[in-house]
Amino acid sequence: MYGKSAIRAVLLLLGIQLTALWPIAAVEIYTSRVLEAVNGTDARLKCTFSSFAPVGDALTVTWNFRPLDGGPEQFVFYYHIDPFQPMSGRFKDRVSWDGNPERYDASIFLWKLQFDDNGTYTCQVKNPPDVDGVIGEIRLSVVHTVRFSEIHFLALAIGSACALMIIIVIVVVLFQHYRKKRWAERAHKVVEIKSKEEERLNQEKKVSVYLEDTD
């Protein structure tokens, strides 16, 4: 009687200790936070995650949308072993799965962007026993044209500088080639003049000798 009670107490205590030793972990979500895309184009809403527990069939991914002008949250996409697209609503036939759970990727593709797609998209990943954690957010701005960022300006400046250097090198090479050609033409003319002068002198010598002989 006491033996069984003692065994149960030991097992209960061991279970409590194991629970205390098990690390308390949550799913960490990583997104771009802000995304800008042109009206009528497609956009990839990137969402990656990390989890202490190994990824298995219990993994679920839920995407929702909060309109910029307010209103209730709307369903966008759901993944559990297989992707489940919305059967109705604004995102019907406009969203597809582009993730890979084995690579901790829960991204989706949104097609044919519209101005009323402006708002916040949330990405929630649950990987039992890791079911807690901060929900990832992406604030999407659909615009007429994409504004230049600092990276774009830097790339443009570097490209312009490289193009200018190439033009300068070409001009220098052409100038050197032209100068060499001019020098060659001048040298050729000098040689021709010298040859004609020598020929004239030879002719004069011949005439002089002839006249001396006739005298």
Image (cartoon, grey):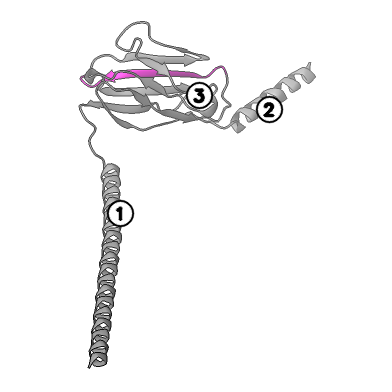
Residue farthest along the top direction in this orientation: 87
Amino acid on which the number 3 mark rests in the picture = Asn
Which residue is at the front of the view, 188 or 25? 188
* Left or right: residue 91 compared with residue 130: left
Which residue is at the front of the view, 23 or 156? 156
Say which label, 1 or 2, has the lower sequence index. Answer: 2
Q: In the image, which disc is placed on residue 14?
A: 2
**Residue 75 vertical placement versus 176 (above, below):** above
Per the model, the C-alpha gap separating discs 1 and 2 is 75 Å
Neighbor class of circle 2 (other Cα within 10 Å; few <14, some 14-19, many 20+) is few
Q: Which residues are magenta?
A: 57-69
Residue 74 location (% of width, % of height): 32, 13
Q: Secondary structure at mark 3?
A: loop
Residue to which mark 1 is pinned: 166
Of badges 1 and 3, the one in the foreground is 1
**Residue 25 vertical placement versus 181 (above, below):** above
